[in-house]
Image (cartoon, rainbow, N blue to C red):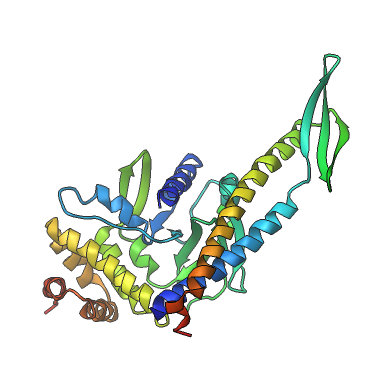
Amino acid sequence: MEKRYALCLDVLKRFQDAGILQEVILVGSWCMHFYRDYFKGVKYMPTIRTRDIDFAVPTPIRIKKRVDVAELLKDEGFLVQFSGGRGFQKLVHPELIVEFLVPEKGRGIDKPYPIPQLGTNAQALRFLDFLIENTIVIDSEGLRVRIPHPAAFGLHKLIVSGRRNDKKEKAAKDIKEGVAVLTALVEQDEAAGIREMFCKMPVPWRKKVVNALAGYEDEDIVSRLMILLTVS
Amino acid sequence: MRVIKGVLEEELENSRQLKKEYEKALKALPRGVLVKKEIGGHIYYYLMQREGNKVRFEYKGKPSKDEIKKYDEAKRLRAKYRKLLADVKKQISFLERALRGKEIRSLS
């Protein structure tokens, strides 16, 4: 795990040195590492077990610099891999897989979204806009990283858990991570922020959050969060 | 337990794919290593390549900076890819053993 963590930091440092780290948003489970700097004085101990390191790119793409990310990470042993039959590009390494994501608009597209500024392409994902529109910047370990606000991260994890129809273990992991972050926010007296963000969500999204929470194992935590998310 | 089996199988498939990618990447690198020799106060470059059990030296004269850089990069990448390929092979071995385990097999 130490090797993976060091490699993740190296990837972020290379992006920062190339001038593109501020143009993208680190999403996915690796955000949880950087929330340690957000949750001070609160018990928060994330365990990150994923190989995936995902970056959301706001659209339309406004990245001015041209950086070939495959070339940038080549000497660390990352290889370009095309998957999905449609040419979705990833950068793969035994310890990490780097992927770029863009918000899915309208009915959605099942082909790669080109990002010529980075010499790669991205997969479009539903609900990603919610993360992109609610970000914070964390200064940590010599890096300045943009990540989703923890409330957005937690609520988003609960929403997307319901979409993992064939992967129950990933759905369970999403719910666990979402609840861990939301609970830490409540303990840091930021429950009002969660509620505000929840109330601004479309009703179908709120239903997804509540449905995901209902299945969580710890009833105390479920009841605390359900009270918070009850909209009259 | 079935969930764990599914995760291991997925990871094994990914690792096998990654092994193929590293083998392909190694084959795509320029063969040989540029070796510098000083003869009579002058520097000459030779491309050293293995052919079976023999080592062959091909005289390259004074290659351009770009060519030297290309071979230096290939040397670094070759070392890197070989190490990572070895790691992936260990991973595959571990996953195959885990999936052959009695408890996991009983789920088939």
Q: Nearer the viewer, residue A23 or A157?
A: A157
| Residue drawn at 35 percent across, 75 percent down | A171
Left or right? Give the position of B1 relative to B52: left
User: Is residue A119 in view?
Assistant: no
> Where is residue A75 shown, x and y percent of the image?
59, 44
In the figure, residue A121 lies in which quadrant? bottom right
| Residue drawn at 86 percent across, 33 percent down | B60
Q: Nearer the viewer, residue A134 or B84?
A: B84
Q: How many marks?
A: 0
Please identify the residue farthest to the front as the structure is shown.
B102
Compared with residue A7, is residue B23 higher up or lower down, i.e. above or below?
A: below
| Residue drawn at 70 percent across, 52 percent down | B26
In the figure, residue B27 lies in which quadrant? bottom right
**In what quadrant of the picture does the C terminus of chain A appear?**
bottom left
Q: Nearer the viewer, residue B49 or A224?
A: B49
Please identify the residue farthest to the top as the structure is shown.
B41
> Where is residue A54 shown, x and y percent of the image?
44, 59
> Where is residue A197 shown, x and y percent of the image?
22, 66
User: Is residue A41 in view?
Assistant: yes
> Where is residue A20 shown, x and y percent of the image?
48, 47
| Residue drawn at 75 percent across, 31 percent down | B65
Left or right? Give the position of A69 relative to A156: right
Compared with residue A136, is residue A121 higher up or lower down, i.e. above or below?
A: below
Compared with residue A102, is residue B28 higher up or lower down, i.e. above or below?
A: above
In the figure, residue A212 lies in which quadrant? bottom left
